[in-house]
Amino acid sequence: MLEAATTTQQERKRLLCALIYKVVITISDDTPDIIDLTIHWQGGVTTGIAEEAPEGWVGLDQAAKILGVARQTVLHRVQRGELNAVHVRRVNRKGLRIQVEAEQPGLFATPE
């Protein structure tokens, strides 16, 4: 981790506490050895960390294809809180899984 020479450990803790709204830890009854961690940041952005993606959530490439937009557009929507996403970490892999509803508008969607 990159640390500024003039920032103390106590100042870094204060900053982190100011930025985090809440942390939610979920333990499933079915799989008690898997813990899902979700960090809700001030400003509405959410970061999830899990070992397994929720059922039906897709990777970045597939989300872009479903929505008919570029990968970067999907990332921007995640950052703005328009799409739910979770970081999945496994032994050899990590990545973003995104919840995409079939009825979510894509780039070329026309209003009805």
Image (spheres, rainbow, N blue to C red):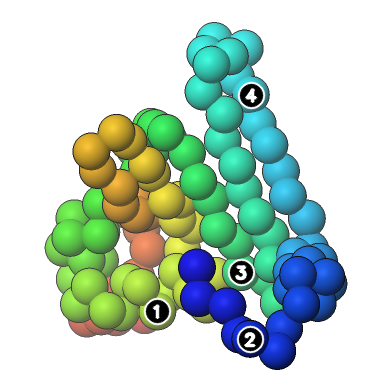
Seen from the viewer's position, the closer of residues 4 and 72 is 4
Q: Secondary structure at mark 1?
A: helix
Foreground tag (1 vs 2): 2
Q: Residue 76: which disc?
A: 1
**Would residue 75 be visible to someone looking at this image?**
yes
Expressed as whole percent of the image width and height from the top left, the position of residue 94 reads 30, 47
Mark 3 burial class by Cα count in 10 Å: few <14, some 14-19, many 20+ = some
Indicate the amino acid at tag 2.
Answer: Ala
In the picture of the structure, the residue carrying the numbered disc 2 is 5
Q: Residue 27: which disc?
A: 4
Q: Name the residue rendered at 56%, 35% in the picture.
A: 36
State the CA–CA distance, disc 1 to disc 2.
Answer: 32 Å
Q: Name the residue rendered at 60%, 61% in the picture.
A: 46
Q: Secondary structure at mark 4?
A: strand
Q: Residue 91: which disc?
A: none
State the CA–CA distance, disc 2 to disc 3.
Answer: 29 Å
Is tag 4's residue or tag 1's residue first in the polypeptide sequence?
4
Q: Name the residue rendered at 49%, 57% in the picture.
A: 84
Q: Is residue 31 above or below residue 99?
A: above
Q: Secondary structure at mark 2?
A: loop
